[in-house]
Amino acid sequence: MTDLIDIVFPDLLGLLHGKTVPVHRIDHPTHYAVTCMVQGLDLNFLETEGYSTSAGFPDMEARIDTETMRPWLDGRQTAMAYLYRTDGHPLPFDSRRQLKALADRWEAAGYTPVSGYEMEFFLLQQLSPMTRLPVPDHRVYGVGTGADPSGTLEEIGRAAEHAKLQLEGMNSEFTPSQVEASLHYQPVLAAADGVLLFRELTRSVARSRGIDTTFMPRPFEDAVGNGMHVNLSLCTEDGDNAFHDASDPHQLSDLARFFMAGLLHHHCALAALAGPTVNSYKRLCPGLLSGYWANWGYDNRITSVRVPGQRGPSTRVEHRVADGSASPHLLTAALLAAGLHGVEEKLPLPDPQVGDADAAPNTDRHTPHSLAESLDALAADDVLFDLLDKELLGAFIELKRQENDRWLRSVTDWEQREYGRVY
């Protein structure tokens, strides 16, 4: 092991940033001070009061969260950080702190929220042009060459174990070269950190072996997209699962029902955080098992909110809307906020969806059909704005609106192929 450590933190888009510093300097936050700015995918800066150009790009401090130190790649260590202004005040644009704030609200009510994530991604022969890795022996739930003839998945698994990311398992999905990986449930902040680090680790390991990966929502039009299912439950102070009620015919507590009602109530607004790219809405469609309709069901994968069949300590609510581009911290914070609203207001839960929701949905509510519509729904959701940091949500919405504007102005290969030859 080297004497270096990566001090990292997520931005509002769920991407990892930070600095590599000598281990003996981890208690000197000014050593890895970075400019206090909000940056979009196009490397342009969002002009928000107190940030970026208008403020002269002031410094901020990334202060290590020592409880998150873990072994990392190439003999280094890594650790997450909280963000502060140089005067010691917390930085509002800190998605980890936002998630912790929601977890603390649940703790104050007597519950510890825990989460586990299922992530899908494609193994790529090359990134540009994007080409899937050939898998001649592909089978669903395949392992070994039935999932990945390059052996990269095995290396990802070993690296994840070395990094203590609590990997439950990996297997091939329905489409050749697509893989699902599951991380074990744990308190929500640690769990979201694990997702961020797993995505980073996966790409690093793959590239070291001459291939690539993508968690992009729907990278190929002839294949299903990459989901990120969030499994949530609440633990009591005694360590019991608060979503389980042995006396209920379905062994599901009222708390769980109110929580799900909150998720469904905010279904359209949550889509902006669950599907935060223009590409997300090519996955959020009927027929793709992606969480399109605002419904729930018992062990029904054609619903947006699913209650898996396990009960007792394993009772949980699975939110199936999100894709691989979602920020695990912001999304989970929003899900906890929506669930909290449902519990505090005792919102009514509609009847469960039985059978194929796409053929006969029991609701006419569904996710918006574009990123622009989802952002409008989030901007209009006063409850989520009250429960989450207004400045953070406002910056997220503005970043994504700029991203959507770039999409509207772009000329695609499809347009050139479709129209260039005849007009």
Image: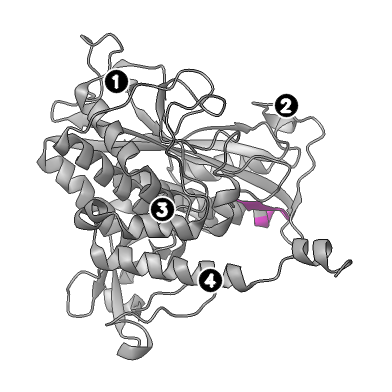
**CA gap, disc 3 and disc 2:** 32 Å
**CA gap, disc 1 and disc 4:** 46 Å
Q: Amino acid at mark 1?
A: Pro
| Residue 111 image offset from top left, x and y in percent | 17, 35
Q: Amino acid at mark 2?
A: Arg
| Residue 289 image offset from top left, x and y in percent | 55, 33
Question: Residue 405, which numbered label?
Answer: 4
Of mark 3 and mark 2, the one earlier in the sequence is 2
The residue at which mark 1 appears reads as 313
Is residue 213 among the parts visible in the rendering?
A: yes
Residue at position x 54%, y 22% from top? 356
Quarter of the figure that contains the C terminus? bottom right
Residue at position x 49%, y 38% from top? 292
**CA gap, disc 4 and disc 2:** 40 Å
Q: Amino acid at mark 4?
A: Asp
The reply to whether the C-beta atoms of the residues labelled 1 and 2 are less than 8 Å apart is: no
Residue at position x 46%, y 18% from top? 354
Q: Nearer the viewer, mark 3 or mark 1?
A: 3
